[in-house]
Image: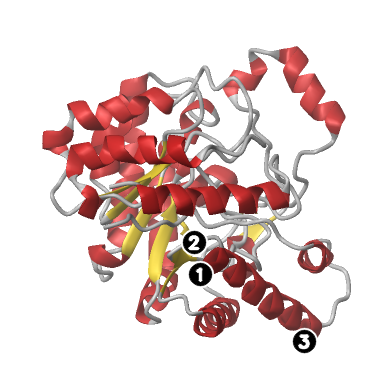
Amino acid sequence: MPLLATHVGSLPRSQAVVDQLFARERGEDHDPAAFDLVMAEAVHEVVRRQTAAGIDIVSDGETSKISYATYVKDRYTGFGGDGPRTVPADLKLYPTFLDRLAMSGTGPKFARPMCVGEVRPKDQDALRKDIANLQAAMAAHGAERGFMNAASPGVISLFLQNAHYPSREAYLAALADAMKSEYQTIVAAGLDLQLDCPDLALSRHMLFTNLSDDDFVRVAQSHVEALNHALSDVPAEKIRVHICWGNYEGPHVCDIPMARMFDTLMSVKARYVLFETSNPRHGHEWAVFRDRAADIPDDKVLVPGVVDTTTNFVEHPELVRQRLDRFVDIVGAERVIAGSDCGFGTFAGFGAVDPEIAWSKLAVLGEGARAAG
């Protein structure tokens, strides 16, 4: 039986979508009805293209979100001002490369406010519109299974840092309580819930560079505890968790190894585990899963990233199949789904991969999945 194919969630936005998102981001006057129409039409198109590419478990491409973490500033109270921009430690080691990135002007520019007050949901109007758009597009294009992304408490704390609560732990607890209803609403709608958790790896070389690896693992475990609390009323079989080291082309020489994060990752209350295996810094780490096979809970489904999301190489479907078969040999075909390393449109309007090449990569992902197993 061929493997199913999915991806991490974010996909390239059309220029019409980008224009609407940044008009709202800059506080410009815009027509809410026109905004909603553009988003609905774009989600229909993004789902159509996913099904045409052979993707079995589709998303809305995070179409209406400016980014996978900072969208919460628009849907929750307590955020304001402008927070610090933290440069990853690996880029600091190569200042000429960092300068080149700065001069290229290709980095995303959007608000990263601080937490300056109590975090509470405003309402769920935007979330319900997202759900309705995805459900309508799935029905129109015959997609039987869909998922929706949501930020984890830990990743919110990474990008929207705390200037209100008395401690990091208190901030995480508040975020976990605030996000509960979003998680529950997504699953109640019949969709799978994906939690984006780069804080479990990326934050090691962004926010916690002064810690030892052991100390960082303890911090990451506290993030998992907050997340699991937020998921207490959501069944594990409806939950996906994604870990990554940062969706950017760079040296990544400061990344904490998967071997150090394996136990933390496996402790998340999620059946589906999405992780990177295609980029050159982490391509070898499939062996961690082989060597720790006995420690992978029986209810976990592995979703390795078998196409890279930071280069414009289009992988050969045979390479995709080979990458997938490594994991099939570890846990069996029924517990492997083909995925991507990260998203193709992490920040609206920005991405290293040309949009049409991104769609070609997804088609190759689907082709490789059908040949694997």
Report the side of 31 relative to 277 (left or right).
Answer: right
Residue labelled with disc 3:
33
Report the side of 210 relative to 47 (left or right).
Answer: left
Mark 1 falls on what kind of element?
Answer: loop
Return the residue nearer the eye: 244 or 202: 244
Q: Nearer the viewer, mark 3 or mark 1?
A: 3
- Three-letter amino acid code of the residue under disc 2: Gly
Mark 3 is surrounded, within 10 Å at the Cα level, by few (under 14), some (14 to 19) or many (20 or more) other residues, namely few
Dots 1 and 2: beta carbons under 8 Å?
no
Q: How is the image coloured?
A: secondary structure
Q: Sequence order check: which comes first, mark 3 or mark 1?
A: 3
- Three-letter amino acid code of the residue under disc 1: Arg
Residue labelled with disc 2:
54
Return the residue nearer the eye: 256 or 213: 256
Residue labelled with disc 1:
120
Report the side of 113 relative to 297 (left or right).
Answer: right
- Three-letter amino acid code of the residue under disc 3: Ala
Q: CA distance from mark 3 to mark 1?
A: 26 Å
Q: Sequence order check: which comes first, mark 1 or mark 2?
A: 2
